[in-house]
Amino acid sequence: MSHSPPPESSRPNLSVAATPGKIGRCFFGAVFAGGLGVLMYRMTMAIAATFAHKPVTSDNVTVINISAAVRTLVVGIVALGAGIFAIAALGLLLLGIQLIFIRLTQQQTSRDQA
């Protein structure tokens, strides 16, 4: 059973209109996500420093192991959040740059056609 491609009229329009509003939102989102990423990175360092300066004082091995696991999880979760925001900021920055290139090439082709 073979499937034929859908007719042209039912295909979604995948062209991107590179308007200044979209470009501005990309860069604003990149700055916002980057700022949150930096704040979360600083919070990660502060949490790690706090944990390093306050060692667990217990003779019970189970308590020491559980506290080490909890500390690792707390630092890891905050670091993961910082990394996600940093990747989102980078992606939005690159998308904004791509939209600028699309806009410039659209202007260039419209000039060439005129």
Image (cartoon, rainbow, N blue to C red):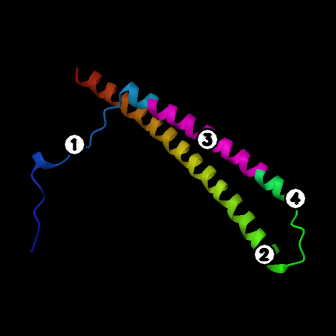
Mark 4 belongs to which amino acid? Lys
Q: Nearer the viewer, mark 2 or mark 1?
A: 2
Residue 65 shows which numbered tag? 2
Q: Which residue is mark 1?
A: 13
Type of the residue with mark 3: Leu
Q: Which residue is mark 3?
A: 36
Quadrant location of the N terminus? bottom left
Q: Residue at x 63, y 44 (%)?
A: 37
Give yes or no for contact between labels 3 and 2 (Cβ–Cβ under 8 Å).
no
| Mark whose residue sits in front, 1 or 3 | 3
How far apart, in angstroms, are the residues tagged by discs 4 and 3?
Answer: 27 Å
Q: Are marks 1 and 3 in contact (CB under 8 Å)?
A: no
Which of the two labelled residues, at mark 3 and mark 2, occupies the earlier sequence position?
3
| In contact (CB < 8 Å): disc 2 and disc 1 | no
Q: Quadrant of the C terminus?
A: top left
Q: Residues within 10 Å of mark 1 (few under 14, many from 20)?
A: few
Separation (CA) of disc 3 from disc 2:
32 Å
Cβ–Cβ under 8 Å for marks 2 and 4: no
Q: Is residue 36 above or below residue 47?
A: above
Q: Are marks 1 and 4 in contact (CB under 8 Å)?
A: no
The amino acid sitting under disc 2 is Asn
Relative horizontal placement of residue 12, taking residue 82 as reference (left or right): left
SS for dot 4: loop
Residue range of the region highlighted in magenta in the rendering: 25-46
Q: Is residue 18 left or right of residue 2?
A: right
